[in-house]
Image (cartoon, grey):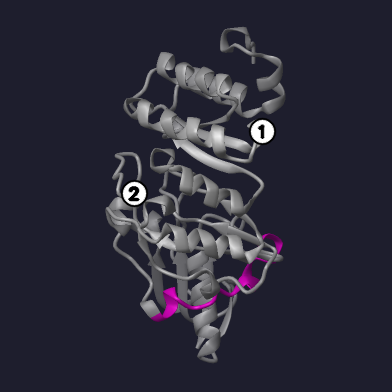
């Protein structure tokens, strides 16, 4: 078979599903390539992670016998078959981003079921181990872990130990749940080679539990202010006063906030200005109060 792949979101970040589909088809002896308009294909896979707000869809190609669409941008009920989900990815599809870097999940699902997040509806309201590290890592110097809530998994200790034992630089890119931190978990995180540690403070109503965890990491964690990042969700069930409270509190605690905007294309100008002030760290360090920022 001749297989064509289309990354609807663009080629600016590796699409893990397409890498696994490519690996599986190549193992069957099929020819796999990025879709080209002047070729004819037996099957085309169209993968889309983001909704139409961020990634407009494209017309279906006409040069294929069969077209299969997948990814959260097309819905929450499409999943890869197990034999494809657990195959070693074809990292050659994205050489710019996968040079000596492995991408994958050790767990899926999240107990939080936040209204702004699709994870619980798509993967379940429990964090469950789905793989060992050696399923998608073969000694690369860098690991990008995409788990939604690894600290909520009952096997967190084994999984974090696997990351520590790899001796690779690990990027846990989705943000850790600070509400689940314990001294033991912080000590385990200290064993992992992390350039940054990321947490999230999404819900103002959860402030007490979030702050307890952040205080615990500040006391026992080894990374310092610039490398202790906290995602701050805005434009969803908070007002500017509550947004500024979280941002100022994080500065006071020597954390580096990073503003995330829910439904950014339709967000108020003030929220976008807030994001520019906080996320540009040159401005953030030189201008201590939002009311002084003229940008």
For the question of whether residue 87 can be seen, the reply is yes
Q: Which residue is mark 1?
A: 226
Main secondary structure found in the magenta portion? helix
Of 249 and 27, which appears nearest the observer? 249
Q: Are marks 2 and 1 in contact (CB under 8 Å)?
A: no
For the question of whether residue 15 can be seen, the reply is no
Find residue 240 and report its image quarter: top left
Which one is earlier in the sequence, the residue at label 2 or at label 1? 2
Of 81 and 288, which appears nearest the observer? 288
The quadrant of the rendering that contains the C terminus is: top right
Q: Is 73 on the left-hand or right-hand side of 89?
A: left
216 in the magenta segment? no
88 in the magenta segment? yes
Q: Residue at x 62, y 43 (%)?
A: 196
Of 86 and 209, which appears nearest the observer? 209
Q: Residue at x 48, y 62 (%)?
A: 159
Residue 278: percent from left, percent from top: 59, 24
Q: Residue at x 59, y 48 (%)?
A: 190
Query: Is 277 located above or below residue 147 in the figure?
Result: above
Residue 242: percent from left, percent from top: 41, 18
Q: Is 145 on the left-hand or right-hand side of 210?
A: right
Highlighted magenta segment, given as a residue range: 83-97
Depth check, mark 2 against mark 1: the one in front is 1
Residue 60: percent from left, percent from top: 43, 65
Q: Which residue is mark 2?
A: 118
Q: Residue at x 46, y 17 (%)?
A: 245
């Amino acid at each position: 078979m001749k297989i064509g792949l289309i990354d609807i979101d663009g080629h600016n970040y590796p699409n893990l599903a397409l890498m696994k589909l490519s690996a599986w088809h190549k193992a069957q002896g099929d020819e796999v390539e990025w879709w080209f308009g002047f070729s004819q294909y037996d099957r085309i896979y169209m993968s889309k992670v983001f909704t139409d707000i961020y990634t407009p869809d494209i017309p279906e190609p006409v040069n294929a016998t069969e077209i299969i669409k997948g990814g959260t941008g097309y819905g929450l009920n499409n999943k890869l078959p197990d034999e494809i989900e657990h195959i070693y990815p074809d990292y050659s599809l994205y050489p710019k981003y996968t040079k000596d870097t492995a991408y994958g999940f050790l767990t899926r699902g999240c107990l939080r079921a936040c209204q702004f997040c699709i994870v619980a509806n798509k993967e379940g309201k429990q964090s469950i181990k789905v793989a060992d590290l050696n399923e998608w890592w073969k000694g690369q110097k860098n690991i990008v872990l995409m788990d939604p809530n690894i600290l909520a998994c009952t096997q967190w200790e084994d999984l974090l130990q696997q990351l520590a034992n790899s001796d690779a630089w690990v990027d846990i890119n989705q943000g850790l749940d600070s509400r689940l931190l314990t001294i033991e978990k912080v000590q385990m995180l200290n064993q992992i080679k992390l350039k940054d540690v990321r947490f999230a403070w999404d819900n103002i109503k959860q402030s007490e539990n979030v702050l307890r965890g952040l205080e615990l990491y500040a006391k026992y964690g080894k990374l310092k202010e610039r490398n202790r990042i906290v995602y701050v969700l805005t434009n969803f069930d908070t007002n500017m006063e509550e947004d500024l409270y979280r941002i100022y509190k994080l500065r006071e605690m020597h954390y580096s906030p990073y503003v995330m905007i829910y439904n950014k294309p339709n967000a108020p100008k003030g929220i976008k200005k807030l994001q520019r002030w906080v996320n540009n760290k040159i401005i953030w360090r030189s201008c201590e109060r939002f009311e002084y920022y003229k940008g």
